[in-house]
Image: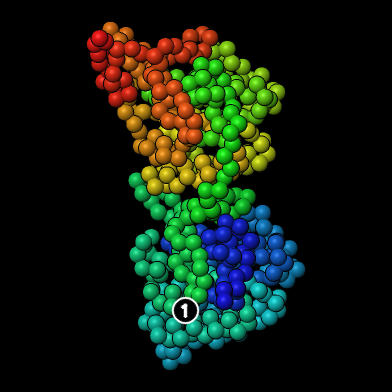
Amino acid sequence: MNLQKLETGNASFDHISHGGLPLGRTTLVAGSSGSAKTLFGAQFLALGIQLFDQPGVFVTFEEQVDDIRKHLRSFHWDIDTWEQEGKWIFVDAAPKEEIIIAVGDFDLSAFRIRLERAIMKCKAQRVVIDSIGSIFTQFHEEEHSIRRELIQVALTLSRLGATSIITAERLEEYGKITRFGVEEFLTDNVVILRNVLHNEKRRRTIEILKFRGSDHEKGENPFTINPEKAIVIIPLSAMILKHTSSNERVTSGIPALDKMIDGGFYKGSINLVSGAIGAGKTLLVANFINGIRENKERCLLMAFEESNEQLYRNASGWGIDFKELEDLGLLKVICVYPEISSLEDHFINIQEIVKTFKPDRIAIDSLSALSRTSSDKGFREFIIAFTAYLKHEEITGLFTSNTPLLAGGTSDTEGNISPITDSIILLRYVEMSGEMQRSIAVLKMRGSKHDSSIRKFTISDEGANIGKHFEGISGILTGNPMLIKLE
């Protein structure tokens, strides 16, 4: 028999928890300072009221009620109205007011009475106690008594049938579960929130450590805090390989390149253009965008290295009018510095734009710039989630990646994305008789034949020109071209 769950209302959490929090049970949410424990609990209550009309009680052992109320209003939750309607009740359980010390003993009986009255008053189905660990900081010598009393609190919640969250602080992101090592024994369920600092970069994750008697997704999932939606989780386990594969082709915008890849990119495919600075990556992106004219498609361009004016000027120099495409409603250009947001925030922002603009194509210039804002692990997870999302939406994607060397080589960015791309186009410099020339080659085209030759690639006022293949030369892709004798 499966354990019955209560939907939290956060669809992503309900996915990784296989349905929500265990119904009628208490879940410990542990995390370091600033990991969003209080917000997680508050969102649980707010969504319960908004989506399911389930009243809730919020108990604070640490912060002032007015401060919490003010903070939660910033997420557009109508706390004041809910309080007036009796759907949300605050219980101020600050130790100085609630704790009774008698002959060295520790007693939470007064608090339990207040908690029970609040739950009964609004018929609360959801309860949040934040943060239970503050009791230990003041009465650490009463550990056995505290444990006994907290067990009584948990039993009270269980008897009243409330689905509850108790938050607790931890000192290390990957150390013991809680600061005092006692709180986790009060509950059958443990959720850990992390806000890890690595190489001067922060990354938030959530992990369901245990749900006793119930299945759940294993491992960490990244999340972010959104001003409109509060905690937004990006469930990596939801990125399942069930997307459709189309045989329909879409043009790259360059007829000669279409010929090299046997008729164009597959619709809904993920395509990578790799090359050094100035090799022509942005030109290929511009042509990819211009290709929407053929069938009146829509394209979203996310540019992380150049401004709108630079992009318009460069495209105009190649005979491509971005402004006209925007005026026709076929193109949307977003130019931002990657450092202004986390990868999770960028992902959510793109999802919101996709919902409203509904593009057929997305171009990212460049992924290398985005990789600066995260750890390698975080970037890999972003790539997996992002490419899976595009395939699910059947959006054709074209990404660019910078190689560290002018004549060749691969970057960490390219290594992270190349295994999950459908095609890879390489742009390389070739030194010929003291002159730098450009080359283009299709390294990979999943599910299709393609031209395997390395061809000459030039840039003129008319844009991109793909010529004949290089003859009598080897080692172009490795960055060590050598003349070979033709017999």
- Farthest-out residue, right: 85
219 up-or-down from 178: above or below:
above
Left or right side of 405 for 93: right
Q: How is the image coloured?
A: rainbow
The three-letter amino acid code for the residue at tag 1 is Leu
Residue drawn at point x = 45 percent, y = 61 percent: 218
396 up-or-down from 123: above or below:
above
The percent coordinates of residue 13 (x first, y second) are 56, 60
131 up-or-down from 116: above or below:
above
- Farthest-out residue, bottom: 103
- Towards the viewer: 450 or 374: 450
Residue drawn at point x = 49 percent, y = 52 percent: 236
Q: Which residue is mark 1?
A: 186
Quarter of the image holding residue 184? Answer: bottom left
Quarter of the image holding residue 320? Answer: top right
Which image quadrant: the N terminus? bottom right
- SS category of the residue bearing label 1: helix
- Towards the viewer: 325 or 169: 325
Which image quadrant: the C terminus? top left
- Towards the viewer: 69 or 18: 18
Count residues near mark 1 (Cα–Cα under 10 Å), then give few for <14, some for 14-19, many for 20+: many
Residue drawn at point x = 42 percent, y = 47 percent: 378
The percent coordinates of residue 195 (x first, y second) are 43, 55
Left or right side of 110 for 330: right
Please say whether residue 163 is visible from this viewpoint: no
Count of numbered tags: 1
The percent coordinates of residue 224 (x first, y second) are 52, 51
Residue drawn at point x = 54 percent, y = 53 percent: 238
